[in-house]
Amino acid sequence: MRIKMLAAVPVAFALLAGSAQAQTPDEPAVTACKSTGLLALQEKSKDITDLVIDMESVAVSKADTKVEDVPVKTVILGEAYIARSGKTGAPDRFVCLLGEKGKVLLTFFTAQ
């Protein structure tokens, strides 16, 4: 299923060509992406301690599309800092797809 969802990344960029709004740190969709993204990153690397979303870089766009039969309702793009053992490096780009009821379908980071 993850491979199929990755096919949606080009669709995500096309969707964001429309309107996107600045977000606040307590935006529920961004919070959901951060928490699931952090858990996924920690599963791959135990030294990851935090994920800091750069809210100035975040673009949230409503969507009305599907990946196969899975509805995609929101696409989020932005930058995040991945903290490892108290050290934070350069930001990584991320994309997050949300489905119905705000369920996170995919959170993808350019580097891990």
Image (cartoon, rainbow, N blue to C red):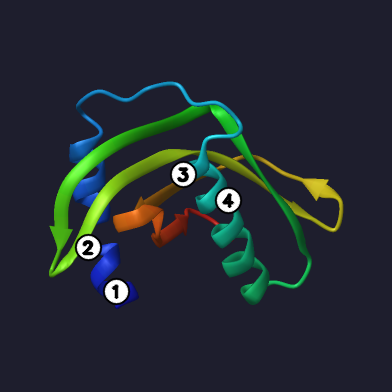
81 lies left or right of 88: left
Q: Are marks 1 and 2 in contact (CB under 8 Å)?
A: yes
The residue singled out by tag 1 in the image is: 3
Mark 2 vs mark 3: give the one in front.
3
Q: CA distance from mark 1 to mark 3?
A: 22 Å
Amino acid type, callout 1: Ile
Label 3 amino acid? Ala
Amino acid type at image mark 2: Ala
Select label 4 or label 1 by which is in front: 4
Q: Give the Cα distance between marks 1 and 2.
A: 7 Å
Q: Point out the tag, 2 or 4, that comes first from the N-terminus.
A: 2
Badge 3 is on which residue? 29
Q: Earlier in the sequence, mark 2 or mark 3?
A: 2
- Horizontal relation, residue 46 to residue 30: left or right: right
Q: CA distance from mark 2 to mark 3?
A: 21 Å
Q: Residue at x 40, y 40 (%)?
A: 77
User: Identity of the amino acid at label 4?
Assistant: Lys
Residue 64 rendering spot, x and y as whole percentages: 16, 46
The residue at which mark 2 appears reads as 7
| Residue placed most toward the observer, 28 or 110 | 28
Kindly give the residue lying farthest to the right in the view shown.
86
Q: Which mark is residue 34?
A: 4
Say which of 69 and 101 sits in front: 101
Mark 4 or 3, closer to the camera = 3
The image quadrant of residue 14 is top left
Q: Looking at the picture, how far across and down is residue 35, in whole percent? A: 60, 56
- Based on the displayed image, in which of its 4 quarters is residue 19 positioned? top left
Q: CA distance from mark 4 to mark 1?
A: 21 Å
